[in-house]
Image (cartoon, rainbow, N blue to C red):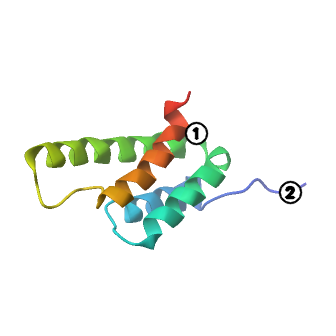
């Protein structure tokens, strides 16, 4: 029998990867978004809940920063935010 796909202890590595990528302004944001979209169903429900919460909290912080006209944006540049918006569709569609 094959072992189910795992991303570290209780999907810790999936959560850590997302937390690392949030706020970055490099190619890693798009790569992380692509990977999350591809692997979402393989990530445990508990880890998906944490990832969703982390991303939604960052969207709130980003929205507030943009409303204030802050130079620093928690989700990065517009192109980075668009990548996270693609990920957000994983749970907004349901």
Residue occupying the point 90% across, 54% down: 1
The answer to whether residue 59 is left or right of residue 50 is left
**Residue 51 can be seen, yes or no:** no
Where residue 30 appears, as percent x and y from the top left, is 48, 63
- Decide: few, some or many residues near mark 2? Use Cα within 10 Å; few <14, some 14-19, many ≥20: few
Q: Is residue 73 above or below residue 58?
A: below
Where residue 15 appears, as percent x and y from the top left, is 47, 56
Q: Which numbered disc, 2 or 1, marks the residue that appears first in the sequence?
A: 2
Q: Residue furthest right?
A: 1
The answer to whether residue 70 is left or right of residue 78 is left
Disc ID at residue 2: 2
Residue occupying the point 36% across, 53% down: 81
Where residue 52 appears, as percent x and y from the top left, is 44, 42
Disc ID at residue 76: none
- Which residue was labeled with disc 1? 45
The answer to whether residue 35 is left or right of residue 81 is right
Residue occupying the point 21% across, 57% down: 73
Task: Give the quadrant of the C terminus.
Answer: top right
Where residue 76 appears, as percent x and y from the top left, is 29, 61
Q: Is residue 8 above or below residue 61?
A: below
* Residues at discs 2 and 1 in contact (Cβ within 8 Å): no
What kind of element bears circle 2? loop
**Residue 27 can be seen, yes or no:** yes
Alpha carbons under labels 2 and 1: distance apart: 20 Å
Q: Is residue 50 above or below residue 1?
A: above
Residue occupying the point 66% across, 44% down: 41
What kind of element bears circle 1? helix
- Please tell me which residue lies in front, 93 or 21: 93
Q: How many marks?
A: 2
- Decide: few, some or many residues near mark 1? Use Cα within 10 Å; few <14, some 14-19, many ≥20: few
């Amino acid at each position: 029998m094959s072992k189910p796909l795992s991303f570290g202890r209780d999907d810790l590595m999936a959560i850590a990867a997302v937390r690392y990528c949030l706020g970055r302004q490099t190619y890693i944001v798009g790569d992380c978004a692509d990977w999350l979209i591809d692997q979402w169903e393989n990530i445990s429900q508990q880890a998906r809940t944490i990832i969703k919460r982390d991303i939604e909290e960052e969207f709130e912080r980003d929205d507030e920063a943009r409303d204030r006209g802050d130079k620093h944006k928690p989700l990065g540049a517009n192109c980075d935010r668009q990548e996270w918006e693609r990920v957000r569709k994983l749970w907004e569609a349901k």
